[in-house]
Image (spheres, grey):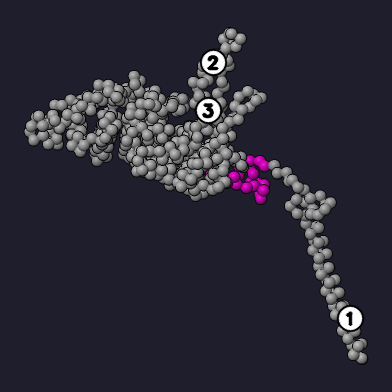
Amino acid sequence: MSESTELRHRNQTKSSTRLTRKARKLDDRAARQAAAVKRPGPRGWFGRGRGESSIIQPVDEWRGTTVQVCGLFPFAVGSGTPMVGVPLGRHLFTNATVCADPISWFQIAKLISNPSVFVLGLPGLGKSTLVRRMALGLSGFGVQPLVLGDLKPDYVDLIDALGGQVISLGRGRGHINILDPGEAREAAEQLREAGYAKLAKQVLADAHGRRHTMVAALLTILRKQPPTDREESIIDRALKWLDEHHAGVPVLGDLLQVIQNGPPEVRAVALDRGDDARYKQITEDLEASLISLTSGGRLGETFAHPTDVPMRRDAPVVYDVSSIDDADQDLQAAILLACWSSGFGTVNVANALADAGLEPRRHYFVVLDELWRALRAGRGLVDRVDALTRLNRQRGVGMAMISHTMSDLLALPTEEDRMKAKGFVERAGMVVAGGLPGAEMPMLTSAVPLSRAEQELLGSWQDPPAWDAVSGREAEPPGRGKFIVKVGGRPGIPLRVELTDAELHINDTNKLWHDQSRTGRRGGELAAVTPLRAEAV
């Protein structure tokens, strides 16, 4: 074979090999295309003229229990929301039922380590309605709601509907005796008869400490500064003298009389050195303050008389203090402290009797609504709430604290109080947030981790309602009844609170706007205007 023939043969061989490889590639591609034709994509057959769908209709969904839908496996999926606790409403995105309350999530579900909830949101978006639903549901579980100072009032109708106790306090509306040990004496006697002398002693010591603390708190509010160490010792010894020598329940006037008379036990701690003139000089300021508390001074006579309505421990209770004007901050602070002292004193008695087996164990759901108003009302209230938030788990009580924004908590006069108030949110077992302005997000996220999507959702709920030209009134605000439940760093649960028809009459906080007819001028005559209809969340 010549050289030219051999070269021609090699080129033909190479060309044939290339054609063979190309044919194989074409065959493989055709095979892949054929396989692809047998498998349509998620939107249908891919390609021009093949009927691909640009919009997919969502599949129909039905909700049911695991017993009802167990036969539909694998087409059934879990709701993803807790089903333990009070049913609050429905999930905004999945429409699943959302159940939540601080006591059930702490005691049963073990989802939180502290039985407390902090609720934040702008006014009019349903914060109190959410907490009323929790209180109503918990009452059905056997937990007693305690509203220790209703400033609006928002809970009177609920407690009354539950057959509970409504105690009204204020100028000319009722009295609360801060020296009344409540049921502590009767409980101590029962404990002694049952052989629990040590527990009885603890109950009486707790009652004495509460009375001493309340007298010192009233003096602090009245004077704008706390009493001196010597005055505290005089008050302590005078209260013990009353317990030993006074028949019945003493009042502040009896305490004043003991200090004026100056028995030897009181003079000993006053360090009068046997000099009567020196004793009067030492007790002069204390005597003047007690006279102001008993003779209708700045705090009125609310604390100068026996308690009108003793608090019960076996029923829901609300202290209605709505008659006190917001400008009367000193009286607000004093009455709130007295209500808290009375309420937690009753809880302590109930726990002691339950420990001894003399009564069934009771749990309580304490509501501190409008917390920002209480914290600003006077010195000592921040420390009081701070102590409650740290000990509520040991006391066997759940707690709900409600405020508008983080700015309200951080507007306290001292940096120490501001840090304590921020700690209320940080220590809460669960935080429920409603509509909030964007300026609140940095402060809120410093206490509770919020994703960007959650922040945007909260911001969208704070918009005001729009005017509906068809109905001639404002449409419902976009954030009314909508909240996000946050527990630590877990994703929030967005929900909308839904009320039953039976709850509507106890959730109207605008009664003064609905119960009266308004009149207006039209054509020179007085024409009746239809009253506004109550809009419930």
| Residue 164 image offset from top left, x and y in percent | 42, 26
Residue at figure coordinates x 52%, y 27% from the top left: 503
The part of the image, by quadrant, that contains residue 463 is top right
> Residue 413 vs residue 60: left or right?
left
Residue 80 at x, y percent in the picture? 57, 46
Label of residue 503 in the image? 3
> Is 160 drawn above or below residue 455 in the view shown?
above
Whether residue 306 is visible, yes or no, is no
- The residue that appears at 23% across and 28% down in the rendered structure is 289
Instruction: Of the two numbered discs 2 and 1 on the same chain, state the one appearing first in sequence.
Output: 1
Q: Residue visible at 33% across and 33% down?
A: 378
Q: Looking at the image, tell me whether mark 2 or mark 3 is earlier in sequence order.
A: 3
Residue 518, which numbered label? 2
Q: Amino acid at mark 1?
A: Gln
Q: What's the mark number on residue 130?
A: none
According to the image, label 1 marks what residue? 12
Which is nearer the N-term, disc 3 or disc 1?
A: 1
| Figure quadrant of residue 202 | top left
For the residue carrying disc 3, how many other residues have a C-alpha within 10 Å: few (<14), some (14-19), or many (20+)?
some
Q: Residues within 10 Å of mark 2 (few under 14, many from 20)?
A: few
Q: Given the image, on which type of amino acid does mark 2 rest?
A: Arg
Q: Is residue 408 left or right of residue 522?
A: left
Q: Secondary structure at mark 2?
A: strand
Q: Which residues are magenta?
A: 61-82
Q: CA distance from mark 3 to mark 1?
A: 93 Å
Disc 3 residue type?
Glu
Q: Residue at x 39, y 23 (%)?
A: 323
Q: Position of residue 445 (x, y in %)?
A: 48, 46
